[in-house]
Image (tube, rainbow, N blue to C red):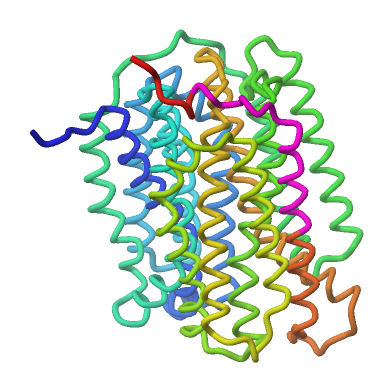
Amino acid sequence: MKPTLSRGSAVALLVAGAYFMENLDGTIIVTALPQMARSFHVFALDLNIGVSAYLLTLAALIPASGWMADRYGLRTVFAGAIVVFTAASMLCGLCQTLTAFTLARILQGAGGAMMVPVGRLAVLRTTEKHELINAIATITWPGLAAPLLGPPLGGFIATYASWHWIFFLNVPLGLAALVAALRLLPRGKEPPRPFDGIGFVLTGAACFVLVYGLELVSRDQASRGTVALTLLGTAAIWGTAWIHARRRTHPLLDLRALAIRSYAVTIRGGACYRMAIAAIPFLLPLLFQIGFGLSGFAAGGLVLAVFAGNLVMKPMTTPILRRFSFRATLLVNGGLNAGIIFACALLTPSTPVPAIVALLFASGMTRSMQFTALNTLAFADVPEGWMSGANTVFNMVQQLFMAMGIALGAVALRIAGLLGPGAAPGAIPLGHFRTAFILIGAISLLGTLDVLGLDPAAGNNVRLRRSN
């Protein structure tokens, strides 16, 4: 008799596909920007508005995902999000002007803001606690693979076909996901709760300003006064949103789960780790191209070693988490990952290629292990009644800090420039990369140290198998 998938496993595969599609779409256009710019008759730098519009919309609307899922049902919202995302993808491929493309990307961001958070909530509600490790491992891997596969795939499509196919590829994927969602997801709704309009405005504005502020900080042209004002404004809006959420009976951003130590660790320390990890795919291609003088194709080939490490590690994550506690796994693996980032600071053009590949491969393995452990532990001890709010906060933090990681890489290089000797405009000396990797490694290590106060038994209800 052939083994059949449980509903939880099938839903996890569905959400993994949607997660991959969304994350791939966020990075695949990077290497196709020159071709798209020629098509729109603009400069390549002008296309950044399309990337930013997508991320900003995503960040601003994610806080409403939990309320939408409770109010209208998981299946309705998830299926609707797939329709919006797929239709917007087709519109992106049909656009003839930058303005139209930007509007289509905003629509895509609206679909993406509902698709993955609601999909993760569906996994949490349809999966037994003892099966949660496998389910989370399934939906974690696409998020790690897509940012690494996106740039080379986008460059290949733009070079040998047309940039339009980058978006048209989402149409058959979206249709398949829609059919699966309608068959697998439950129809039920949660008890209605009032919509927190003030919280939505405050939280959406806080996310929007934070992403915009980080993008501003990463630009060389930004003045110190503008950057300082933006950061102060961001802090003020976030503080107001936090106070509002604490005082309201039914806040849009439910912060109760932060009282659970295991969940709080995945938010605080996890935020540092996600920033550090997201900065690495930004810094490595620059190091290989600017620091080592390699071609874009050769640099992309080296970075694919990280993806290979992710791929090889995936089947091992569940057995490791079954064997060792979350605390031990996060401490040891987090320390290894920080050490690998520090080791990247030692790379030079004379470093043997096999040594570079081995280091990046190990980075991919520790990256996969840490993400799976954090994403599983986050919901291990959260009561069912708090799950929707905890999922919304987790997805918002994950999206924001992964986006912050790219800006962090740019900021680390700017700090390195201030600390080290000057350089010609546009040039990045090898010493600046060394300083940047040390700064990023320190942030990753800081996130790992937050695990020290975690109870060794935290998450055992999902880690240990049930006895019959």
How many callouts does the rendering have? 0
Question: Residue reaching furthest left?
Answer: 1
Q: Height in image: 446 above or below 285?
A: above
Q: Nearer the viewer, residue 435 or 337?
A: 337
Q: Height in image: 109 above or below 202?
A: below
- Is residue 420 left or right of 21 when viewed as pictured? right
- What kind of secondary structure does the magenta stretch mostly adopt? helix
Instruction: Say which residue appears at 71% left-offset and 38% top-offset.
Output: 451
Quarter of the image where one finds residue 414: bottom right
- Is residue 420 left or right of 30 when viewed as pictured? right
Instruction: Say which residue appears at 50% left-offset and 69% top-offset.
Output: 30
For the C terminus, which image quadrant? top left
Q: Height in image: 405 above or below 191?
A: below
Provide residue 436's location: percent of width, then percent of height: 76, 69
Q: Nearer the viewer, residue 175 or 379?
A: 379
**Residue 198 visible in the picture:** no
Instruction: Say which residue appears at 80% left-offset and 28% top-offset.
Output: 240
Part of the protein shown in magenta: 442-461
- Is residue 125 left or right of 320 when viewed as pictured? left
Q: Is residue 401 magenta?
A: no
Provide residue 363's location: percent of width, then percent of height: 57, 63
Q: Nearer the viewer, residue 27 or 209?
A: 27
Provide residue 133's location: percent of width, then percent of height: 44, 34
**Residue 379 visible in the picture:** yes
- Is residue 356 left or right of 188 when viewed as pictured? right
Provide residue 243's location: percent of width, then percent of height: 79, 22
Q: Nearer the viewer, residue 95 or 51?
A: 51
Instruction: Say which residue appears at 36% left-offset and 33% top-offset.
Output: 78
Q: Is residue 452 magenta?
A: yes
For the N terminus, which image quadrant? top left
